[in-house]
Image (cartoon, rainbow, N blue to C red):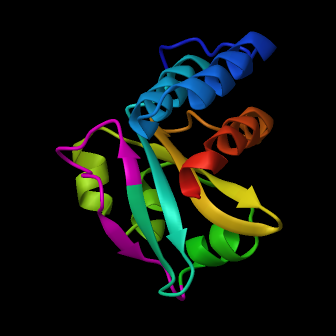
Amino acid sequence: MTQKKEILALSDVAAILDSTARDRDPQTSLRAVDALAQRIFGHKLFTVMRHLADSNEVERIYSSNPAAYPLGGRKQKQGTSWGRIVLDEGQPFIARNEAELRASFPDHELILSLGIGSIMNIPVMLKGQCIGTMNVSGEAGQYGKADFPSGRILAGLIVPFML
């Protein structure tokens, strides 16, 4: 990985909260979270998905690359180990390399074609339920458990956009 990660600062959180409170367009605030995630984690792709519990799908509400991953795109997650870990248990998930990406994501060919070698998925939680996911994708080995606390904070800032 060539990018140096920054530490999440309280002023970063305050800026996102201010954007959420003032901007009428949710995409503006989600772009601000995307930019912050770029500084904190680094990524080649940043997406936010809403969990549709009734159909056990996730629906994309934000994408840093709408040509490859357009808004409104849905994925079925019923019966997958990813769905059990992230959606059912509310735990973060990391695919660290190409083999783990291939095993975890049916759209792995598109993912790999974008130069992505790892993905970190952070559940967006509210009242004990996973209501969505924040997903950062980058180079192989780029993400680890040390990224989870900052990821959970950023995911918490996304809650208003899931409601």
Residue 16: quadrant of the picture: top right
Residue 18 is a magenta residue: no
Q: Can residue 106 be seen in this view?
A: no
- 156 or 92: nearer the viewer: 156
Q: Can residue 136 be seen in this view?
A: yes
- Judged left or right of residue 66, residue 1 is right
- 108 or 160: nearer the viewer: 160
Residue 62 coordinates in the image, percent (x, y):
39, 45
The residue at the point 72 percent across, 44 percent down is 156
* Relative vertical location of residue 89 with respect to residue 30 in this rendering, above or below: below
* Relative vertical location of residue 9 with respect to residue 87 in this rendering, above or below: above
Residue 68 is a magenta residue: yes
The residue at the point 31 percent across, 51 percent down is 111
Residue 67 coordinates in the image, percent (x, y):
17, 44
The residue at the point 67 percent across, 38 percent down is 157
Residue 99 coordinates in the image, percent (x, y):
45, 59
Residue 53 coordinates in the image, percent (x, y):
57, 80
Query: Magenta residues, as a range?
Result: 61-79
Residue 63: quadrant of the picture: top left
* Relative vertical location of residue 37 with respect to residue 110 in this rendering, above or below: above
- Which secondary structure dominates the residues rendered in magenta? loop
